[in-house]
Amino acid sequence: MATSNTTTETPPGSSRVTVSDGDHQRPFMRGILVHSLMSRDLSFDDALRVAELVRSRIKPEGVIKRSELAEIIEKVVTEDFPEIEMTAPNALVEIEVGEGRDAAPFSKGHLSQSLLASALDPSDAFEVAREIENDLRWKGVRSVQRSVLRRMAHDALVNRFGQRTADRFLCWRHYQEPERPVVLLIGGTTGAGKTSVALEVALRLGIGRVLSTDSIRQVMRMLIPRELVPALHVSSFDAYRELPGSSETENPAVDGFIAQASAVSLGARAMIDRAVEENASLVLDGVPLVPGMIDLDAYANVADVIPVVLARLDEEAFASHFQSRAGRERRRDSARYVENLGAILAIQEYLLDLADSHDVPIIDNDSVDQSVRRVIAHTVDTLGKKRELDLLSLIQ
């Protein structure tokens, strides 16, 4: 058998260096380091550059601890290649949150979702969650208690956004497993953007039940004949056409609206009662959620009911919204909204007067994202004022 005299040149330091990790040892290999660096979001070219320089910095013979190798890698990246961004080590190692059967994998998405209760922008919430994840991985954490994770989140929020924002996070964590439900009522006239805001608020707060009085009204229409409650079977802004000639206010459109809202509020109260019975938080939106029409004091001992009124205070922008909507949604006959803008504005003014007299906050919906954050901030701040919570106990 012929024997090959060909020898393979061994790169300096690669086969003579052993990496020690506790009781385990393995030869240092540039290819393995390149693969490891690529798992930390480096490109192949950047990973190869870093690995080459790391190899040149290692003593040509002997044993190096894994922790020492990690220090050399971080130093090379930060000092020699500052343009390279690298995630924390152990990026593929799962971190457990909690203990035993209650343990669950750490989720950056889940943490950022819970941070939205602080009324943060979603991008800011994700950035805070990413920083916390990196902090855990840099420290080599494999398991973390929920209270410790909450403390890390609270501290990060204090440092970046202030104490009030951080306290909102802890306050809403208390209401994740409530003794009684939180019921958020989002009122406002047609076209104010109630449903869009309600859906996003519920999503960010993790509230599973979102209802609209439109659905309640549709069910009531099927059960109650038009002859009995004619105002129930038309839109809120033209319900006055179904009323007799007498007027309770100076504007017939407002009279028709009141008649319809009074009927639908019965269904709204039934939805609140159901939420109380099942101890399930709820976001309910709709035109008939008129400040003062539902007796909120009746729920004082069984639920936290928080009303807000959404409005569009810029009348020109309001008109443009309806005109755009009419162009997009022909099947819904949205042109009627443009034709009845005067009645809609009169109803909005009536709602704003009632909100002011009943100390219900008015939110100008000039931006959906801003409105969502304002509603969340008001909701959590109100909950914090209603009860003297020991927020620090949640992170101890």
Image (tube, rainbow, N blue to C red):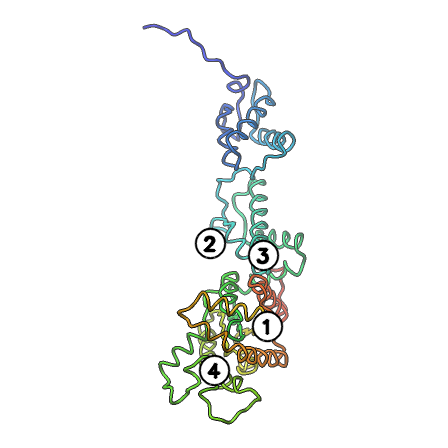
Residue for point 52% across, 70% down: 182
Identify the residue under disc 1. 315
Which of the two labelled residues, at mark 4 and mark 2, occupies the earlier sequence position? 2
Residue 126 at x, y percent in the picture: 56, 51
Q: Which of labels 1 and 2 is toward the front?
A: 1
The vertical placement of 383 against 300, above or below, is above
SS state under label 4: helix
- Amino acid bearing label 1: Glu
Mark 2 is surrounded, within 10 Å at the Cα level, by few (under 14), some (14 to 19) or many (20 or more) other residues, namely few
- Amino acid bearing label 2: Asp
- Distance of mark 1 from mark 2, alpha carbons? 52 Å
Identify the residue under disc 3. 121
- Distance of mark 4 from mark 2, alpha carbons? 55 Å
Which of the two labelled residues, at mark 3 and mark 4, occupies the earlier sequence position? 3
- Distance of mark 1 from mark 4, alpha carbons? 19 Å
Which of the two labelled residues, at mark 1 and mark 4, occupies the earlier sequence position? 4
Which of the two labelled residues, at mark 3 and mark 2, occupies the earlier sequence position? 2
Identify the residue under disc 4. 238
Identify the residue under disc 2. 102
- Amino acid bearing label 4: Asp
Mark 1 is surrounded, within 10 Å at the Cα level, by few (under 14), some (14 to 19) or many (20 or more) other residues, namely few
Q: In which quarter of the image is the N terminus?
A: top left
Q: Quadrant of the C terminus?
A: bottom right
Mark 4 is surrounded, within 10 Å at the Cα level, by few (under 14), some (14 to 19) or many (20 or more) other residues, namely many
